[in-house]
Image (cartoon, helix red, strand yellow):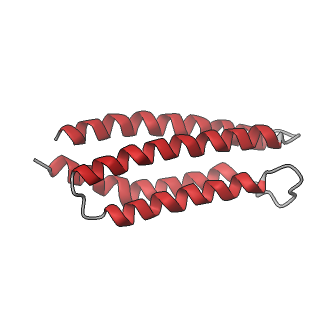
Amino acid sequence: MAHAHAYASTNHDDHAFMEAIGAEIESQMCRQLLNRTGLVNSLTLLRSAMKSHFRREESIMMAENYPYLFQHKGSHDYIINYVSIFISCFAPGREDAPAEVWPLLKNTLETHITKYDDPLAGYLDRSP
């Protein structure tokens, strides 16, 4: 049950931090003159925050022998790869940058939370 409490509080703080970075990304995308370097920096910060969050989450899943660790970690890997692709799209000299970065990432994260994090939270709440 200790892991359930640690997971819930860490999850809330991490998600709030990532949401704040996302709001900054969205703000940068709305500017008339896109600052690609600033956007790459924000996306890199988001990826770093995600990696830290995912490591903590995976550690809890391992400690609790979570039966869906493999699938959950696969979703983490997919998300990190997705952010990395966005980072490369905004590299200086690239012209093929997508217009809606944060909405696409946010949708991916919301799907992850619903499909993977919510069941994990339920599992941890039931753990002795």
Foreground of the two, 12 or 89: 89
Percent position (x, y) of residue 74? 44, 64
Percent position (x, y) of residue 45? 62, 39
Q: Is residue 94 above or below residue 31?
A: below
Foreground of the two, 75 or 27: 75
Residue 95, by quadrant, is: bottom right
Taking the view exactly as shown, the residue that stands out farthest to the left is: 128
- Say whether residue 111 is visible: no
Left/right of residue 92 with respect to residue 10 in the rendered view: right
Foreground of the two, 124 or 77: 77
**Residue at (89, 53) in percent of width and height:** 93
Residue 3, by quadrant, is: top left
Percent position (x, y) of residue 77? 50, 60
Left/right of residue 69 with respect to residue 15 in the rendered view: left
**Residue at (32, 61) in percent of width and height:** 69
Q: Quadrant of the N terminus?
A: top left
How many numbered tags mark residues here?
0
Left/right of residue 6 with respect to residue 56 in the rendered view: left
- Say whether residue 71 is visible: yes
Left/right of residue 113 with respect to residue 118 in the rendered view: right
Percent position (x, y) of residue 32? 87, 40
**Residue at (38, 40) in percent of width and height:** 11
